[in-house]
Image (cartoon, rainbow, N blue to C red):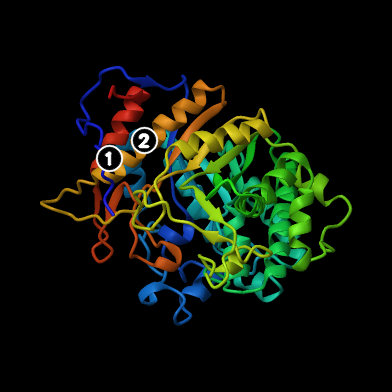
């Protein structure tokens, strides 16, 4: 659906003063390894859960896989040159664990490490700050075979892998994210099964969420030991959650979904505890016997920053007899009967409601937890794009970015210590279970020819970076 709001001026040469961001604001773009790298079976890389999942019939739209993706593995230089042309100050990428450590433990693959060394060196040579994410959903398949994230040992293996990466790249990489969106890894991967590894068990999802956070805490400690000057954080995907009405039942539905979507992670990570109401809500799913003494202290190991991924808002209502929950209820263990309500506002090609003020609200909420610097580590939109005469005029995406950056600036004005913004995504890519049918990129990718075409949003974003702010409206 097209966004009916009037888009901002697309004139990338317009340098009129408007909203200026703080000096040193870190302007970036983000990707993930399985979504762009390709070379799935080259140079010692072994399968991850996403290789297995995408090669399983019926799991991904049209049978698409990440075997080739954007062929970034072979086009590293070309892609970094595009980043430099955009003027990016930082590039957030993830490491394929199974490229570096094919079994998920033990022997390290030197060719895999060499790829990331070359990437980091190329970024630095172009004046672009590397921002390394250790885990963006692609668990090595042998670790899943041994139990996956519901198994406690996976957290220990993640810490070992972190040490490998810190030893290899810690002298050149300043910024480190342990996990990207653990909610998705846990509740989509082990609850609803719409993401890899495709399991559908609420108790497994809750255990996976805890062990992901435990792995995060152990990874922070490993990074501190190996590279004391590293800037270490975690990225969580967060949503404002509103009741569809002011009735007590709808307010309670919002409380329950907010607990699973937001507080399940924010409270252990930043307060060292699980919310009591959330534990009560999940009592029909698990007794939390997987939480051991000392776990929450490890999970809440002090950080240097917090990354926030923001895309939309949830509006929910209490169950109505005979009305099924939506989306797949197993995403929300213990709250399967809550209804997700559409407000009839503009949506992206993913069907996600466009709600820029929700970014301001989310950033202010996280600041209520912590005085740490915050970064928007993902924000973006999928729309249907067409190449016409060699150009992609993606006015809807441009308008989306403009509105959300203004919302980010509003958060800064309210006192939020926001230090940077990473657009999702640098380029069109493999969009998980949607395959290649959804495009989030500022750079269009022709998946047959691998030709890259910067869209209007890319040219506009370059002007934002150049002026360190937004033109007057």
Residue at 50% in and 33% down:
360
Badge 2 density bin: few <14, some 14–19, many ≥20, Cα 10 Å: many
Report whether 278 appears left or right of 181: right
Residue at 41% in and 70% down:
67
Q: Residue 451's spot in the image, x, y percent?
A: 24, 56
Report whether 375 appears left or right of 223: left
Closer-to-camera residue (296/42): 296
Q: Which residue is mark 1?
A: 5
Closer-to-camera residue (403/151): 403
Mark 1 vs 2, N-terminal side: 1
Q: Residue 370's spot in the image, x, y percent?
A: 68, 32
- Which of the 4 image quadrants contains residue 437? bottom left
Q: Foreground mark, 1 or 2?
A: 1
Pick the quarter of the image with the N terminus: bottom left
- Which of the 4 image quadrants contains residue 331? bottom right
Closer-to-camera residue (35/210): 210
The residue positioned farthest toward the left in the image shown: 389
Instruction: Report the number of numbered marks.
Output: 2
Q: CA distance from mark 1 to mark 2?
A: 10 Å
Callout 2 secondary element: helix
Closer-to-camera residue (221/469): 469
Pick the quarter of the image with the C terminus: top left
Residue 64 visible in the snapshot: no
Callout 1 secondary element: loop
Q: Which residue is mark 2?
A: 403
User: Cβ–Cβ below 8 Å for labels 1 and 2?
Assistant: yes
Residue 333 visible in the snapshot: yes
The residue positioned farthest toward the top in the image shown: 17
């Amino acid at each position: 659906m097209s966004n009916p709001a009037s888009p901002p001026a697309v004139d990338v040469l317009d340098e009129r003063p408007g909203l200026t961001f703080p000096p040193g604001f870190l302007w970036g773009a983000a990707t993930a390894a399985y979504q762009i790298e390709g070379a799935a079976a080259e140079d010692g890389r072994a399968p991850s859960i996403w290789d297995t999942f995408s090669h399983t019939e019926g799991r991904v739209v049209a049978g698409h896989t990440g075997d080739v993706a954007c062929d970034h593995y072979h086009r590293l230089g070309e892609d970094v040159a595009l980043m430099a042309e955009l003027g990016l100050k930082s590039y957030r990428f993830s490491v394929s664990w199974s490229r570096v450590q094919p079994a998920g433990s033990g022997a390290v693959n030197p060719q895999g490490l060499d790829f990331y060394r070359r990437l980091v060196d190329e970024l630095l040579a172009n004046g672009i700050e590397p921002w390394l994410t250790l885990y963006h959903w692609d668990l090595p398949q042998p670790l899943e075979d041994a139990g996956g994230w519901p198994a406690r040992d996976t957290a220990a293996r993640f810490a070992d892998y972190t040490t490998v990466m810190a030893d290899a790249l810690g002298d050149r990489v300043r910024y480190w994210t342990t996990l990207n969106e653990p909610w998705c890894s846990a509740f989509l991967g082990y609850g609803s099964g719409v993401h890899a590894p495709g399991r559908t068990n609420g108790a497994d999802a809750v255990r996976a969420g805890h062990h992901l956070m435990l792995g995060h805490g152990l990874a922070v400690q490993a990074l501190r030991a190996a590279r004391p000057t590293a800037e270490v954080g975690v990225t969580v995907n967060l949503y404002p959650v509103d009741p569809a009405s002011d009735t007590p039942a709808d307010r309670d539905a919002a409380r329950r979904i907010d607990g699973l979507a937001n507080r399940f992670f924010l409270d252990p990570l930043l307060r060292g505890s699980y919310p009591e109401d959330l534990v009560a809500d999940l009592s029909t799913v698990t007794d939390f016997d997987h939480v051991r003494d000392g776990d929450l202290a490890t999970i809440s190991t002090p950080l240097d920053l917090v990354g926030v991924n923001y895309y939309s808002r949830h509006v929910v209502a209490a169950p109505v007899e005979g009305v099924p929950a939506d989306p797949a209820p197993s995403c929300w263990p213990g709250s399967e009967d809550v209804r997700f309500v559409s407000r009839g506002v503009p949506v992206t090609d993913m069907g996600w409601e466009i709600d820029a003020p929700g970014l301001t609200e989310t950033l202010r909420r996280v600041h209520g937890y912590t005085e740490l610097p915050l970064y928007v580590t993902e924000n973006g939109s999928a729309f249907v794009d067409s190449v016409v005469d060699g150009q992609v005029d993606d006015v809807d995406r441009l308008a989306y970015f403009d509105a959300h950056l203004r919302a980010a600036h509003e958060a800064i004005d309210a006192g939020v210590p926001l230090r940077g913004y990473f657009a999702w995504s640098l380029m069109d890519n493999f969009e998980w279970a949607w395959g290649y049918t959804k495009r989030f990129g500022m750079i269009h990718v022709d998946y047959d020819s691998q030709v890259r075409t910067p869209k209007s949003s890319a040219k506009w974003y370059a002007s934002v970076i150049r002026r360190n702010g937004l033109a007057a409206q």
